[in-house]
Amino acid sequence: MTLANLLRPDAGLRVLVTAGAGGIGRRIVEGYREVGARIAVCDVSEETLAAFRNEVPDALAVNCDVADREAVADMVHQAREALGGLDVVVNNAGIAGPTGAVEDLDPVEWERTIRTDLDSQFYVAHETARDLKESRGSLINIASVAGRLGYAYRTPYASAKWGIIGFTKSLAAEMGPDGVRVNAILPGIVEGERIRGVISARAQALGVSYEEMEKRYLANVSLRRMVSADDVATTCLFLTSPGGANISGQAISVCGNVEVLM
């Protein structure tokens, strides 16, 4: 096998991507489809799913709120039945959560963020672990640079993402003897609608303009630029290629080197 081929995932992989019908998840799906993978996705938005089904009719697309443990169990069952097993699971679903000082945060919003961003990753791993052990497959948990840096006014989100890192490293040690690789990807400031919302909320919280807040964000990135969904997708592809066969238990930042989060 040539070195170039080592960077290409095997054809025919059976891939499940949560929140895979839009955004970063959709680009991850598109990357795997380009190398011949068979795909199952879930999403909480029926509108997003409808568009996905229209454009990708050969994939399974299930409506699922990943914060609902029983819904996750049913979704994974459908994916398993449709694909005949699972080789790759990408825990991509998550929400931004609230922005505000800790004394002002609504505890309901805290709980919702932890359920959606952290508990959901456990639910998916719990339901897919036997499949991945059988296929000696790969679990990729999407975290954030907020999982390695302090993030003032975003404590629910940061707490969940730090939790994902510990969950990932612990699972890698637990499942490694069964041949399962577990890694986390830590995107930085990913261009798109979500980060525009985050920057707007932070600007409002600090009483500055959107433009000023965006400038402050990028000043703390060594490369002075945002990353793209493609950057995250190609990292997923590498981790599940033959070239990534001995990478496990890692928290891989795809961020242009974010130095500080504001």
Image (spheres, grey):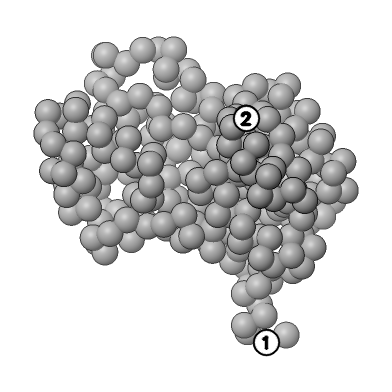
Relative horizontal placement of residue 114, taking residue 145 as reference (left or right): right
Q: Is residue 54 above or below residue 244?
A: above
Circle 2 or circle 1, nearest the eye: 2
Q: Is residue 202 above or below residue 185?
A: above
Q: Nearer the viewer, residue 30 or 135?
A: 30
Secondary structure of the residue carrying tag 1 is: loop
Tell me the residue that label 1 is attached to: 2
Residue 35 visible in the snapshot = yes
Residue 244: % across, % down: 62, 67
Q: Residue furthest bottom?
A: 2
Quadrant in the rendering for residue 14:
bottom right
Q: Nearer the viewer, residue 107 or 178?
A: 107
Residue shown at 32% from the left, 16% from the top: 105
Residue shown at 41% from the left, 57% from the top: 228
Disc sitting over residue 37 in the figure: none
Q: Which amino acid type corresponds to the residue marked 2 in the rendered image?
A: Glu
Residue 69: % across, % down: 68, 23
Badge count: 2
Relative horizontal placement of residue 35, taking residue 231 as reference (left or right): right
Q: Which amino acid type corresponds to the residue marked 1 in the rendered image?
A: Thr
Q: Is residue 43 above or below residue 156?
A: below
Residue 230: % across, % down: 48, 60
Disc sitting over residue 46 in the figure: 2
Residue 152: % across, % down: 25, 32
Crowd tier of the residue under label 2, counting other residues whose Cα lies within 10 Å: few below 14, some 14–19, many 20 or above: some
Of labels 2 and 1, earlier in sequence is 1
